[in-house]
Amino acid sequence: MFKLPELTYAYDALEPYIDARTMETHHSKHHQAYVNNLNAALENLKELSTRSIEELLEDLNNLPAQSHWAIRNNGGGHYNHSFFWQLLNKDGAKEPGGKLRDKINATFGDFETFKIKFKAAALTRFGSGWAWLVVNRESDLEILSTPNQDTPLSDGKKPLLALDVWEHAYYLLYTNKRADYIDNWWNVVDWNKVEELYNK
Ligand code: MN3
């Protein structure tokens, strides 16, 4: 049985950039629903019960066909949100350093250019989905976006940074202004954490 992870911070900890009401609804209602639906989908699949969420999502094509979409959508929802929460900290490092900084500069030119490209990926994801910074199979950095709750793990890519661009992530505070949400979200990205993931 999968469980909703507790946040390591209060719902209002990311104010004013992400408001408490959005955080509470997003975590306790949306994320909880993905967990519940994932557990329901796995109820009669005992052979999968020892797998981690990562193992399930890395092996989507070999799941029982009748459960593919339930696990893809709800398992992805559980994994993506768990990943997203851990990157948020208003007091975290505002920019990457170390080897990750060097790699970002080598790949995108500089940190500012990286941010512009990441924002473009987040803005142009039509409908619901996520924007990502990942390490691909060639150990290179890549910016991409995924629809719905699809995750780069299923393509063999290692996530470093994720941004939820579903309307439920920003509509209460930003209404339809996804660009403003993205601009403000940078204030709560903890680059120490992103670096930690990169160096793992
Ligand atoms: Mn969400």
Image (spheres, grey):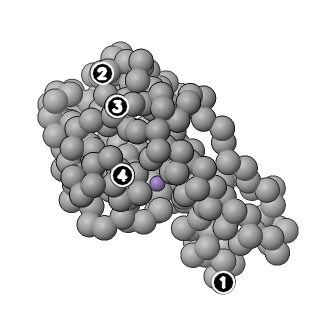
Residue 172: give its label: 4
Q: Residue at x 35, y 59 (%)?
A: 167
Q: Look at the numbered discs 1 and 4 and tell me whether their residues touch, using CB distance below 8 Å.
A: no
**Residue 182 pos. (x, y %):** 26, 43
Residue under circle 3?
A: 16
Residue 66: give its label: 1
Q: Look at the numbered discs 1 and 2 and tell me whether their residues touch, using CB distance below 8 Å.
A: no
Q: Residue at x 60, y 29 (%)?
A: 8
Which quadrant of the figure has residue 102? top left
Q: Disc 3 to disc 1, how far (Cα)?
A: 43 Å
Q: Earlier in the sequence, mark 1 or mark 2?
A: 1
Give, as a three-letter code, the residue at label 3. Answer: Pro
Give, as a three-letter code, the residue at label 4. Answer: Leu
- Front tag of 2 and 3: 3
Residue under circle 2?
A: 95
Q: Earlier in the sequence, mark 2 or mark 3?
A: 3
Q: Disc 3 to disc 4, how far (Cα)?
A: 13 Å
- Front tag of 1 and 4: 4
Give, as a three-letter code, the residue at label 1. Answer: Gln
